[in-house]
Amino acid sequence: MSKRYELSIKERRDIESRSFGTIETTTTVTIPEGCVGFIGIRKRYGSKGIFVTSPFLWGPWEGCPTLDIANMGGTMEEFLQGEAIAHVAIVREVDLEGTVNDGLHDHNGSGESKGSTTGASL
């Protein structure tokens, strides 16, 4: 399963160089149970040193994401209302053995799914 949303800026915002800010978006995103949304900044911003500091949305969740933005570039950046700023890709959560974590089943009675990678070193 894979789905993608494009996030648009709710209102104009300026973020100074070497600082952090938040940007509200207008796109309603739905993350189902057992899925994760990954937020990726558009290339035109990423190439200027701008990135999302909290790039995950854990399901179940629904709403318009507010992005925590870091501007590590050398200049102030202007974000214009209605402009596309990022994408959200939604994927199903799986453990390292490849089984789907649907969030609904307790396979071994311990509160963890069988084959859990909790405590495992990678």
Image (cartoon, helix red, strand yellow):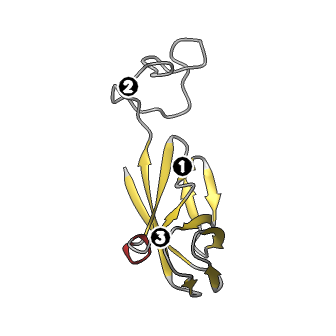
Q: Earlier in the sequence, mark 3 or mark 1?
A: 1
Query: What amino acid is labelled 2 in the image?
Result: Leu
Say which residue appears at 55% left-offset and 86% top-offset: 82
Q: Which of these two is toward me, 104 or 6?
A: 6
Q: Secondary structure at mark 3?
A: strand
**In terms of image quadrants, where is residue 40?**
bottom left
Horizontal and vertical percent position of residue 3: 40, 59
**In terms of image quadrants, where is residue 120?**
top left
Horizontal and vertical percent position of residue 28: 59, 68
The Cα atoms of the two marked residues, 3 and 1, are separated by 20 Å
Horizontal and vertical percent position of residue 39: 48, 60
The Cα atoms of the two marked residues, 2 and 1, are separated by 27 Å
Query: What amino acid is labelled 3 in the image?
Result: Ala
Disc 3 crowd, CA 10 A, few/some/many (<14, 14-19, 20+): many
Say which residue appears at 52% left-offset and 55% top-offset: 55
What label does residue 122 carry, if any? 2
Residue to which mark 3 is pinned: 86
Q: Earlier in the sequence, mark 2 or mark 3?
A: 3
Apparent side of residue 114 relative to residue 54 in the rendered image (left or right): left
Say which residue appears at 51% left-offset and 68% top-offset: 72
Tell me if residue 65 can be seen: no
Say which residue appears at 37% left-offset and 54% top-offset: 2
The image shows residue 80, relative to residue 15, as above or below, that is below
Residue to which mark 1 is pinned: 32
Horizontal and vertical percent position of residue 73: 48, 73
The Cα atoms of the two marked residues, 2 and 3, are separated by 30 Å
Q: Which quarter shows the C terminus?
A: top left
Q: Which of these two is toward me, 59 or 80?
A: 80
The image shows residue 75, relative to residue 3, as above or below, that is below
Q: Secondary structure at mark 1?
A: loop
Disc 2 crowd, CA 10 A, few/some/many (<14, 14-19, 20+): few
The mark lying in front, picked from 3 and 1, is 3
